[in-house]
Amino acid sequence: PLRDLFFEKSEILKINSGEFSAFANKNFDGGFYEFQSKTPAKFFGVTDGEKSAFARIGNVVKKFEPRKIGGKAHPTGCGDALLACLIKALAQKSECGFEDFKAAMDFATKQAEKSSIYGL
């Protein structure tokens, strides 16, 4: 189903690197640049926890480095928190930009520093 969604027109498509590698049959690190242009999503982002993330808007691709966590990371729910931030930006501004992606990544990282995102 995710592979089918990848080829549908959408405002935002955000997936994790494992999902990307599974349906693209490509290594995430090099495969993003080759495969990202095949989605008609206006904003396409791929995250990989503490590793580099990538986003594409139109024909522009940017690489992002998440803020490092000093202690133990608690990643459960962080991808959902990141996507919620992107949806909020879309609802408020009618678009999702690179600055919104960076802010969403920072928010998700802050949540990963907590023992549970449910205490928001």
Image: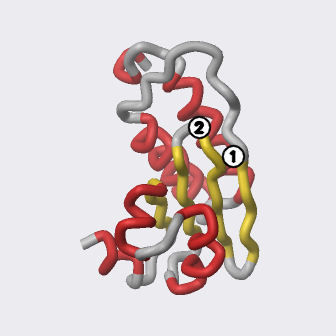
Left or right of 58: which side holds 2?
Answer: left
Q: Quadrant of the N terminus?
A: bottom left
Q: Quadrant of residue 45?
A: bottom right
Residue under the image location 48 percent in, 60 percent down: 14
Mark 2 and mark 1 residues within 8 Å of each other at the beta carbon: no
Residue lying at the far left of the rendered structure: 1
| Vertical relation: 14 (above or below) 60 | above
Q: Please state the horizontal and vertical placement of residue 84, each as a whole percent of the image.
A: 46, 45
Residue for badge 2: 50
| Vertical relation: 23 (above or below) 28 | below
Q: Please state which of residues 82 and 112 is positioned toward the viewer in this rendering.
A: 112
Left or right of 19: which side holds 46?
Answer: right
Q: Amino acid at mark 2?
A: Glu
Q: Depth-wise, is mark 2 or mark 1 nearer the camera?
A: 2
| Vertical relation: 101 (above or below) 61 | above
Residue for badge 1: 102
| Earlier residue among tags 2 and 1 | 2
The local crowd at label 2, few if under 14, some if 14 to 19, many if 20 or more residues have their Cα within 10 Å, is: some
Residue under the image location 74 percent in, 63 percent down: 62
Q: Quadrant of the C terminus?
A: top left
Residue under the image location 56 percent in, 68 percent down: 44
Left or right of 106: which side holds 77?
Answer: left
